Amino acid sequence: MRKEIRSRRINRIGSYAISSSMSMRDHRQQPCITCTTFNILAPIYKRLTVNNDKSQNSRESDYRAYWLVRNQKILDSLLRERSSIICLQEFWVGNEELVNMYEKRLGDAGYINFKLARTNNRGDGLLIAVRKECFRVICHRELLFNDCGDRVAQLLHVELAGPYSPSRNNDTRQEILIVNTHLLFPHDSSLSLVRLNQVYKILQYVESYQKENKLSPMPIMLCGDWNGSKRGHVYKFLRSIGFVSSYDTAHQYTDADAHKWVSHQNHRGNICGVDFIWLLNPNRYRKLLKSSWSEAVFGMFKYLVRRASLTEEKAFALLKADNDSDCITYSGFCEALRQLNLTGHCYGLSDEETKDLWVQADMDGNGVLDYKEFQQRIWNPTRSEQKDDGVLDDDHKGGEEQTIGFSVENAVLFPPEVEKGKWPENYYLSDHARLTVVFSPIRMPCSQLIS
């Protein structure tokens, strides 16, 4: 019965639906914060058919009345929902009138805003806004990938306002790191590595920021358009280091439930689920970042050789190259990566990244890889298993260092048809759905990283 009620209310959207569902929550009755991510489709990319003109060169940016009305309605919907955190992608930073409209209306509604343009004057970028009554902004950082996609990311470090404390008598600082990004579109398979590398750069930057400021583990939210589904390498990489998909957590979906929801209809007419709000709680920090990165790249290697119908033994032979002994040399390793299109071009692994992978694989450091090392480090690396609930394990002991994390209370996509894996014909606000997640602050211990 409880599941039935929850199912009915999840299909609704808006601040009233979310707040009413929160009032039905369990006995804790903790205050919540809400986070919305939305790719609002920049007018410079939105194709139009005007006066029966079938030309692909007609863009909404050429028709002020069109983009103005659509963006006013986007703002109307965002301000009705009044999320604590708003992360927008494809924000048209190149148009001063649109920028001023968003800044004024969000500012008047009590938000503090930060925008970031993509590099090389692409015209669009990112916007992140947080409600002043919910947060104190500690720092805002900009990350420029300077890669083939001219992509960027924002890092916002905030502290929750007092009323959101899970315990009035506790002096634990309640801080969050929020990331907003839009990854490269995978125009072909050679760009999958670029997208994986973009995520790695984001996490490296977050890790460096934490070390630089001597921060204790705190919740990390990664928001945005990831341009990849639950079947992709980016998804598997984030899962391997402890992140959970908030929407899937709220709906109790597993990693295999990729078909149950969509959030985007791309320019090819395909529908897919690519918009995520990822959560990493302080009790879910799993592995050193470089170890997970190497596993992700080796996972891509395994995918490529399997796609070429190569078995485990043939994959070992590919890496061995012309070496007569029963082991893999560094030169053979590099040649195999080149043959699989993972190196040798501007989108591929750098020499430094290739060497780092080799060091990770060469367990005994003797300069060659035997079959056992190939199996354990490349073909079947050991992965940490995570639960999907994103909350505290029952078996944690109370004596550990305590901090604040989040439980996922609810998550909704709009328009509601996308939650059933369908794209509605009459939806015009964007070619993406809006995702909103409700989080509740809870106490939890910090976990230790696995080396």
Image (cartoon, rainbow, N blue to C red):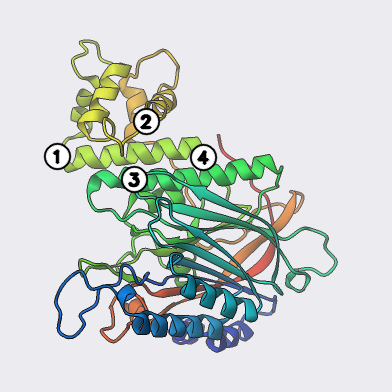
**How many numbered dots are placed on residues in this image?**
4
Q: Label 2, label 3: how many angstroms apart (C-alpha)?
A: 14 Å
Label 4 secondary element? helix
Q: Amino acid at mark 3?
A: Cys
Q: CA distance from mark 1 to mark 4?
A: 30 Å
**Which of these two is toward me, 326 or 218?**
218
Q: Which mark is residue 309?
A: 1
Residue bearing the label numbered 2: 350
Distance CA(mark 1)–CA(mark 3): 30 Å
**Figure check: 225 above or below 218:** below
- Residue 94 x/y as whole percent: 43, 65
Looking at the rendered structure, which numbered label has been put on residue 289?
4
Give the mark nearest the N terminus, 4 or 3.
Answer: 3
Mark 4 vs mark 3: give the one in front: 3
Q: Are marks 4 and 3 in contact (CB under 8 Å)?
A: no
Picture residue at 62% right of the left edge, 52% below the top = 283
Neighbourhood count class around disc 3 (C-alpha, 10 Å): few under 14, some 14–19, many 20 upward: few
Q: Which mark is residue 148?
A: 3
Query: Distance of mark 4 from mark 3, alpha carbons?
Result: 24 Å
Badge 1 element: loop
Q: Nearer the viewer, residue 151 or 123?
A: 123
* Labelled disc at residue 241: none
Let me know if residue 359 appears in the view.
yes
Q: Nearer the viewer, mark 2 or mark 3?
A: 3
